[in-house]
Amino acid sequence: MVIVSPRLIHRHLKEPSLRRIFHFLEEDLEVQSYLQMANVMAVERLKYNDHGPVHSRITSGSALEIFDILTRRFAPTTVRDNICSLEDAKVIVLCGAYLHDIGNAIHRTAHHIHGCIIANSILNRLFSEAYQVDQELALRLKSEILHCIFSHDENVECLSMEAGCVKVADGTDMAEGRARIPYKMGGVNIHSLSALSIRKVEILEGDDRPVRIVVNMDNPAGIFQVERVLERKISSSGIEEMIEVVALQNGKEIKSIPDKDPSRRIMGTYR
């Protein structure tokens, strides 16, 4: 069991290639400038939750954690399709997760499309500087990473396990810290209030389904984040049959995905 946090990523940097790529992304002027601008657009102007460097780190760690659990039982899509090795598949997950929200630097609307445009040249440099592979493999990896970025939008279906891990991981960043900045700036809305009620999110290996996500909250407002963010992302992730979610309020279960007790649901909301 691990807690979703900015530190989780360091649990998954054992391979030298992943360490090099993570440091490239963390230290690259273009990447960090665009992520800072993503927060200018999303947080300062729209009063949304964090979409900058911290969110990138959190999503990267969560995506690799989910990916690690799933690959204990299943072959990743890119390995199955003879696109790349398992190590390369982890590179796809890391880059897709770290760069998924970079398009917010242009605008929140269609940011999954803007992100692909921005990330294209960044990935070209990454593959020539930090992760030196042959050109054909680099192009295959870039295609898969751009797929992760494009399909993290809840209305786009993921076509790979790698993209699904990125998408679900994006939804796991819902704890209180993500909403502090917009809340302090006056962004009082259901998104910030819901996030502020969530104390921690945990990822662990499940029994009935491989991945179990536990959302701990002290106020039922946190259900909004679960239903309107995480559940929607899971539904178009392509790995929805591999994920279960349990929401706890002060240690008591108040919601599960898939729903174990349909009688609790009335007109789309829980009693």
Image (cartoon, rainbow, N blue to C red):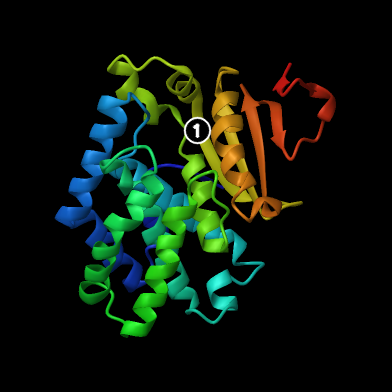
Relative image position of residue 62 (x, y in whole percent): 47, 50
Residue that lies at the very extreme toward the left in this rendered image: 29
Q: 234 or 60, which lies in front?
A: 234
Q: Is residue 249 left or right of residue 61?
A: right
Q: Quadrant of the C terminus?
A: top right
Where is residue 175? Give x, y as percent.
46, 31
Image label count: 1
Q: Residues within 10 Å of mark 1 (few under 14, many from 20)?
A: some
User: Which residue: 49% across, 53% down?
Assistant: 151
Q: Secondary structure at mark 1?
A: strand
- Residue at left offset 58%, top offset 33%: 215
Residue 15 percent coordinates (x, y): 37, 71
Place of residue 99 in the rendered image (x, y in percent of width and height, measured from the top left): 34, 53
Tell me, yes or no, if residue 44 can be seen here: yes
Res 106 → quadrant = top left
Vertical relation: 10 (above or below) 268: below
Image check: 234 left or right of 132? right
Q: Which residue is tagged 1?
A: 200
The residue nearer to you, when weighing 113 against 66, is: 113
Q: Mark 1 is on which residue type?
A: Lys
On screen, 189 above or below 53?
above
Q: Is residue 7 visible?
A: no
Determine whether, in the image, residue 23 is placed left or right of residue 83: left
Question: Who's the residue at 60% across and 42% down the image?
Answer: 213
The residue located at (46%, 58%) in the rendering is: 148
Determine the residue located farthest toward the right in the rendered image: 263
Residue 178, quarter of the rendered image: top left
Specify whether 205 is left or right of 138: right
